[in-house]
Amino acid sequence: MYTGRFAPSPSGPLHMGSLIAAAASWLDARAAGGRWLVRIEDLDRPRCMPGAADAMLRTLDRLGLHWDGEVLCQSRRLEHYRAALDKLARQTYWCGCTRREIADSSLGLASDGAHIYPGTCRHGTARKRALRVRTTAEPISFVDRVQGRCQQVLEQDIGDFVLYRADGLFAYQLAVVVDDAAQGITDVVRGADLLDSTPRQIYLQQLLGLPTPRYLHVPVALDTAGGKLSKQTAAAPIETDPCALRRALAFLGQSEAGTLDQALRGWDPQLILRRRAMALAP
């Protein structure tokens, strides 16, 4: 059975960028007669805002984006991430490099703006700051349902990447792979800002022997100045926009739909523009 999910970080109220991703994943799941789950990605506790998760859930419910089953919180699943790290023991190593050291010795910038790790600590280090997984020169490719064929060579495009952070937190790339498998996620529908993370997640799925879902990445919504709508850029919460759902549906190619029911009847991912980002209509 189709099983999709919406997995926000509770670092602030739900905004238009998050609503677009939520609506797309809900519509895709319901159109397929499938289940739609909600997962709260609250591993990065310093960035979490008290009460934000409950506020997000209330907003989703008010808009008619009802989920199935219990809401899963990553902060309650630490032992599962630890078990995954244990399975990857032969593919991982400790890294003692600081951010400045990585920047000074980097092979350049990855597509997501991070410095490509040059493998400085691959052969051992006395400092144990973060745990990295070894990457290879074998291309990782997949066909996104909107963005088309995507490919990365992790060793040259990203470098060995972190699974356990220097601040003692499990990395997003590890946690999302473990949780998607545990929840039986068959289809991941999310924003295209995570498109370049997908090859890393597929690589971890392969190492852990986990299934790879299908992926659909919708364009990232931009404000009038061309900036990404996100909590980091102080995007307005959707409670202040009475037309928020209608605007989200129009962004997803459902310009004639005024309600979720109408959008569901006409849902077609092929109507979503094949772009990484685009402006949100006022």
Image (cartoon, grey):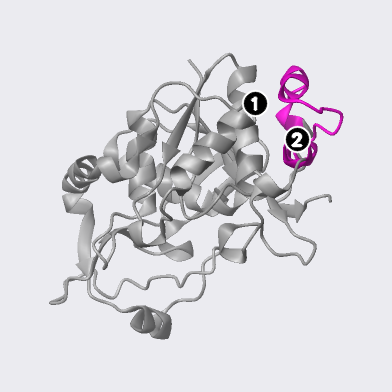
* Sequence-first disc among 2 and 1: 1
Query: Could you tell me if the residues under marks 2 and 1 are in contact, i.e. CB atoms within 8 Å?
Result: no
Instruction: Give the residue displayed 63% in from the left and 49% down from the top.
Output: 15
Residue at the far left in the pictured view: 126
How many numbered badges does the structure rendering display?
2
Which structural element holds mark 1? helix
Q: Does the magenta stretch include residue 259?
A: yes
The location of residue 3, given as percent across then percent down, is 48, 23
Instruction: Give the residue displayed 73% in from the left and 19% down from the top.
Output: 261
Residue 249 shows which numbered tag? 2
Question: Is residue 259 shown left or right of residue 80?
Answer: right
Question: Is residue 55 shown left or right of residue 126?
Answer: right
User: Alpha-carbon neighbours of circle 2 within 10 Å: few (<14), some, or many (≥20)?
Assistant: many
Residue nearest the observer in this picture, 36 or 159: 36
Q: Is residue 13 above or below residue 125?
A: above
Amino acid type at mark 2: Leu
Residue 270 shows which numbered tag? none
The location of residue 226, given as percent across then percent down, is 75, 64
Label 2 and label 1: CA atoms lie apart by 10 Å
Question: Is residue 168 shown left or right of residue 74?
Answer: left
The location of residue 236, given as percent across then percent down, is 66, 56
Q: In this picture, which residue range is highlighted in magenta? A: 243-270
Q: Can I make out residue 139 in this image?
A: no
The location of residue 188, given as percent across then percent down, is 52, 35
Instruction: Give the residue displayed 60% in from the left and 17% down from the top.
Output: 32
Q: Name the residue under label 1.
A: 27
Q: For residue 75, which quarter of the picture?
A: top left
Amino acid type at mark 1: Leu
